[in-house]
Image (cartoon, grey):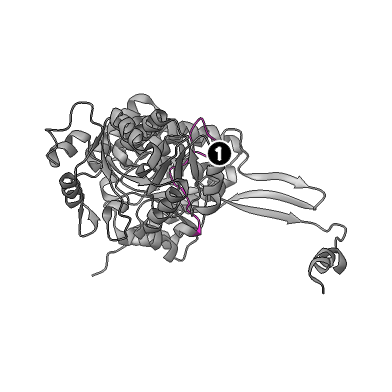
Amino acid sequence: MSEDTSIIDEVVNRARIAQQHYEEIGSQQLFDDACCAVGWALMEPERNRMLAELAVQETGLGNAADKVRKNHNKTLGLLRDLKGVASIGHIRDDDEKGLSLYYRPKGVIAAIVPSTNPLATPVNNIINALKTGNAIIIAPSPKGMKPALALLEHIHQNMAKLGISEDLVQLVPSPPSKAKTERLMQLCDMVVVTGSQNNVRAGYKSGTPAIGVGAGNVVTIIDETADIDAAAEKIAASKTFDNATSCSSENSVIALSSVYDEVVSALSAQGGLVLQPDEISRLADTHWRGGKMTPTLLAKDIDIMISELSLESRANHDTRFLIVPQQLIDIDSPLTSEKMSRFLTLYRADDFDDAANMAVQIQSVLGAGHSLGLHSKDDERARRLAMTARSCRIIVNQAHCFATGGFFNNGMPFSLSMGCGSWGGNSIDENLNWTHFINKVNVVRVIPENKPEVDDIFSSYWDRHGK
C-alpha cells in the first residue's frame, strides 16, 4: 500500500499562499531583515552550541565544536555576501540596448539536505530563499529531523518579530520519507539537492527545475615548489575538521617524488599516522562492505578509529588522522573513492604532469567537476589544471574544506553546495548562491536597428580561407 502524501500538498499550498503575500508586501529591507532573523537563529552562541551538540547526538557524525565554527562562519560569510545586494524588483536599465532588468522569486523552493550538515546547509538555503522573496520547504534526512525541528522553532520565533508567516519556512512533516520528498519535488517550483547522488538524480527526474550538486572526492597535489610544512598544516586542518564530513575534505594527496619523503614527514608532524599494509587492509575492510561505507568509521573521532582498527600500540595523543600510502587507482578499489573519515590516501608522482594525470584518473572514478587542490608557488600550474582537469575549482595553497565553499580570504561565494558542471552531471558549475533563486525579467524596447552587412561578418574569414 502506497504512503499517503496528501499532507505534502497541504504544506506546499500553505507555502504558496505565504510566498505570494511575502512578495506582495515585500521590500528589500524586509527580505534582508528576514535573512538576519534566520542567521541569528543559528548564530546566537548558546543556541549554536546547543544545536550543534544535538546534531552530533542525533546523526553520530562530526563533532560539536567544529560544527559550531562551521555554523558561525558559513552563515556569517553568506550574510556578508548578501549585504547590500539588490535581489528583488527593478535592478537596472540599459538605455543603449533598450532593456530593463527585474528580479522576481522562483516561488516555493524544495531543499533536500544531508545529515552531514543538518544545520548549516538548511540555513544557507533558507537565507538565499528569503533574500529573493521565496518560500522554502526543507526535507531533512531522518537522522537530521530532530535538529532541524529545533532549528525551525528558533527561526519561526525570529520571523514572528518581523510579522511574516512561519509558513514561509517549513519542514517536511515527520517522519520524513522518500515518498513525501518525491511528492514535494513534484509540487514545488524549484528543487535544490545537496547530499547523496541518488537524491540528486531524483531531483533531476522530478519534472521540476532542479539544482543538484556532484559528489566530492577532493585530490590535492603538492609540487616541488610548495611550502611543504604550510601545505601539511592546511591539509591536516581540513582533513580533520568536523571529522571529514565535508565533501570538500581532502581524500587523496599526490606528492611529487622529489618531495614525497618530506611530505610524509610534514604530514606526520601534523598528527598523521602512516599505516602499514596489514593495517590498510583492515581499514578498507572496516570502512567499506560491498563497496558501500559502513557507519563504523564514518565521520568518527580519531580515538574511535584507533580503537576500531587496533592501532593503540602505534598511535599516540598527537595522532589526528591516518595516512594510507597507495598507488592503485581503480574503480573497483574503494580507497580511490571518497572517504568521509579521518584518513587520506597518499600517492607518489614522477613529476607534475604525472600528478595531474593521476588526479584526473582519481576523479574520473568519483568527484569529477568538484574541485582540486594545489600547493605550489608556480601559478602557471594552477592555470594548466584549469584547462586540463575536469574540475570547476582549483584551490591554490589553501585548506580545502574551508576554501571551496568560500572563505573570508578568498573570493568564492559562501556556500555548502558546490555545482560540478557537466563533468559532475550538474546543471550549475559554481557555488550555489542567491542568483540561482531568482527569475530574471527583461523589459525589451525598440532601439535603432543594428544589422551588419554580410562582409562585416565574413570578410576576415574569407581572407584566411576563401569563399
**In this orientation, does residue 268 appear?**
yes
Q: Circle 1 sits on which residue?
A: 379
Left or right, 50 with respect to 98, comes to left
Disc 1 marks which amino acid?
A: Asp
Highlighted magenta segment, given as a residue range: 407-422
Q: Nearer the viewer, residue 222 or 139?
A: 222
Extreme residue toward the bottom, this view: 467
**In this orientation, does residue 165 appear?**
no
Look at the magenta stretch and give its main secondary structure.
Answer: loop
Locate residue 345: give its quadrant. Answer: top left
Residue drawn at point x = 60 percent, y = 39 percent:
27
Locate residue 310: give its quadrant. Answer: top left
Image x and y of residue 388, in percent: 52, 53
Secondary element at image label 1: helix
**How many numbered markers are drawn?**
1
Residue drawn at point x = 18 percent, y = 28 percent:
316
Residue drawn at point x = 85 percent, y = 57 percent:
447
Q: Nearer the viewer, residue 395 or 126?
A: 395
Q: Residues within 10 Å of mark 1 (few under 14, many from 20)?
A: few
Image x and y of residue 257, in percent: 38, 42
Q: Nearer the viewer, residue 175 or 438?
A: 438
Let me know if residue 351 is in the magenta part: no
Q: Is residue 11 above or below residue 251?
A: below
Quadrant of the frame with the C terminus: bottom right
Let me know if residue 415 is in the magenta part: yes
